[in-house]
Image (cartoon, helix red, strand yellow):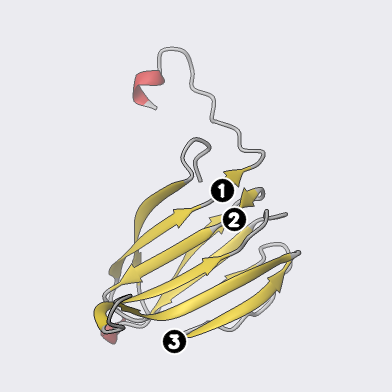
């Protein structure tokens, strides 16, 4: 979560046997995470401080309360806005309005046939990152940071 960009895209390998985790730092406001792939996925979250089992969401929408925020989890097929026809890919997402008061783990698990690793597209955006500090870059290293 960079201090100077409030949105971006990343890629990561996901499989049926391994979870992929995005750790959201304290102070992130109005977060939206969307993961798309060519295979079905499930999504859940975990509080690193208070370990609590939250069931994965697959092909559904779910709302969960967490530390004063309402988390909205969503999973299913990507469909056309105009025709509602499946576009051949799958999505999972998590969003909230407000500011995180502690770290939050967003966990994605793929359900591809055979369980091999597949690459997923992770797009994120947020309103602000309160308390973010840019890393110190030593003199003469600015060209390489």
The picture places residue 13, in percent across and down from the top left corner, at 33, 65
Q: Which of marks 2 and 3 is nearer the N terminus?
A: 2
Residue 33 vertical position relative to residue 55 in the rendered view, above or below = above
Residue at the top extreme, as displayed: 140
Instruction: Confirm or deny contact between disc 2 and disc 1 (CB under 8 A).
Output: yes
Residue 36 vertical position relative to residue 26 in the rendered view, above or below = below
The picture places residue 102, in percent across and down from the top left corner, at 70, 55
Report the residue at 46% width, 13% height from top. Answer: 139
* Residue with the mark numbered 3: 59
Would residue 14 be found to the left or right of residue 2 on screen?
left
Report the residue at 31% width, 81% height from top. Answer: 115
Q: Residues within 10 Å of mark 1 (few under 14, many from 20)?
A: some
Would residue 79 be found to the left or right of residue 73 on screen?
left
Q: Earlier in the sequence, mark 2 or mark 1?
A: 2
Residue at the left extreme, as displayed: 88
Name the image quarter holding the C terminus.
top left
């Amino acid at each position: 979560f960079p201090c100077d960009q409030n949105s971006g895209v990343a890629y990561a390998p996901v499989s049926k046997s391994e979870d992929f985790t995005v750790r959201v730092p304290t102070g992130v406001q109005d977060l939206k995470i969307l993961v798309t792939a060519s295979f079905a996925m499930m999504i859940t979250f975990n509080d690193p401080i208070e370990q609590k089992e939250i069931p994965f969401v697959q092909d559904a929408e779910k709302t969960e309360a967490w530390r004063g925020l309402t988390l909205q989890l969503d999973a299913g097929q990507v469909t056309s806005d105009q025709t509602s026809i499946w576009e051949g890919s799958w999505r999972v997402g998590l969003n909230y309005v407000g500011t995180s008061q502690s770290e939050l783990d967003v966990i994605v698990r793929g359900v591809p046939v055979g369980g091999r690793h597949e690459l997923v597209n992770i797009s994120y955006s947020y309103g602000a990152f309160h308390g973010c500090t840019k890393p110190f870059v030593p003199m003469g290293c600015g060209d390489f940071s």
